[in-house]
């Protein structure tokens, strides 16, 4: 069983991830990616988590996020011993959401929101929800960006990127809008995206493994 701490927030203790053996309640392991005391390397002085960590049992991976301390960590767990270790970190990735995972075991992609870096933390909880965010696709094994959409209006904190047919991802906007995203392989990219995504196809050769992301908005029903 995998669980995290700080669902209600903490100004004294960073978030930790726990793994407990279902057959032995005394067999518990933990890892604290943000450190065990503040201040952490990022300079964070508080920690809060709205969404549970992502778990990929096929690849023995756990993904942790913190919408106050910021950052995303990829963690490997030895399922026979419970031991955990960090395999990658993305201090620049800021999400409050759950993670969605798509693709085959050896090419799995991790998807979640990416809140604009210049957003003050109090703005996340304000009634106006005036901050912006993008949607980010990364290589699950390495944490490297595959595609990132343009910045759009904010979506509900602590929500799940909903994966649909044809590679579409649906996000619920705070202003009553549904955002629809879809990644295009560079060799198939024929649609002009407005606004332009943050990642784009290279001009050198279409065989380069990169992608661009398109998004559209439609009123919610």
Image (tube, rainbow, N blue to C red):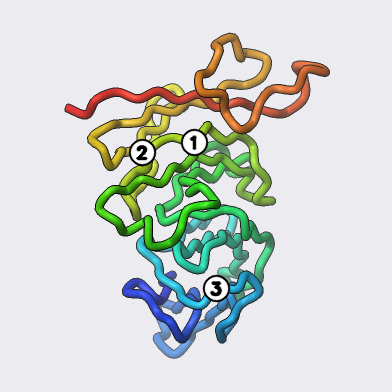
Mark 2 lies on residue: 162
Estimate the spatial distance between the alpha carbons at disc 2 and disc 1, rounded to whole Å. Answer: 18 Å
Mark 3 is surrounded, within 10 Å at the Cα level, by few (under 14), some (14 to 19) or many (20 or more) other residues, namely some
> Where residue 107 sits: x, y (%)?
63, 39
Marks 1 and 3: in contact by CB < 8 Å? no
* Residue found farthest to the bottom: 26
Mark 2 is surrounded, within 10 Å at the Cα level, by few (under 14), some (14 to 19) or many (20 or more) other residues, namely some
Which comes sooner in the sequence, label 2 or label 1?
1
22 or 86, which lies in front?
86
**Quarter of the image that includes the C terminus:** top left
> Where residue 155 sits: x, y (%)?
34, 43
Q: From the viewer's perspective, is residue 64 above or below residue 13?
A: above
Mark 3 lies on residue: 44
Q: Tell me the tag on residue 151.
A: 1
119 or 133, which lies in front?
119
Estimate the spatial distance between the alpha carbons at disc 3 and disc 2, rounded to whole Å. Answer: 30 Å
Q: From the viewer's perspective, is residue 206 above or below residue 23?
A: above
Residue at image point 23% right, 35% down: 176
Which comes sooner in the sequence, label 3 or label 2?
3
* Residue found farthest to the left: 221
Q: Identify the secondary structure beneath mark 3.
A: loop
* Residue found farthest to the right: 204
Marks 1 and 2: in contact by CB < 8 Å? no
Q: Tell me the tag on residue 184.
A: none
> Where residue 1 sits: x, y (%)?
41, 71
Q: Identify the secondary structure beneath mark 1.
A: loop
> Where residue 214 sits: x, y (%)?
50, 24
Within the image, what quadrant is residue 86 found in? bottom right
Which comes sooner in the sequence, label 3 or label 1?
3
């Amino acid at each position: 069983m995998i669980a995290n701490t700080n669902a209600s927030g903490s100004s004294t203790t960073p978030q930790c991830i726990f793994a407990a053996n279902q057959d032995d309640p005394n067999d518990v392991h933990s890892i604290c990616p943000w450190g065990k005391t503040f201040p952490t390397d990022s300079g964070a002085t508080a920690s809060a988590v709205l969404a549970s960590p992502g778990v990929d049992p096929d690849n023995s991976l756990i993904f942790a996020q913190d919408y106050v301390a910021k950052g995303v960590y990829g963690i490997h767990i030895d399922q026979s011993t419970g031991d955990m270790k960090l395999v990658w970190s993305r201090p620049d990735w800021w999400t409050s959401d759950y993670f969605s995972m798509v693709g085959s075991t050896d090419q799995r992609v991790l998807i979640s929101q990416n809140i604009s870096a210049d957003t003050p933390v109090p703005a996340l909880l304000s009634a106006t929800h005036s901050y912006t965010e993008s949607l980010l696709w990364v290589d699950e094994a390495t944490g490297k960006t595959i595609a990132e959409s343009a910045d759009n209006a904010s979506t509900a904190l602590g929500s799940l990127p909903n994966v649909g047919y044809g590679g579409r991802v649906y996000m619920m906007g705070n202003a009553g809008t549904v955002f629809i995203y879809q990644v295009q392989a560079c060799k198939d990219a024929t649609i002009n995206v407005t606004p332009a995504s943050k990642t784009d196809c290279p001009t050198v050769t279409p065989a380069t493994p990169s992608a661009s992301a398109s998004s559209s908005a439609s009123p919610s029903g």
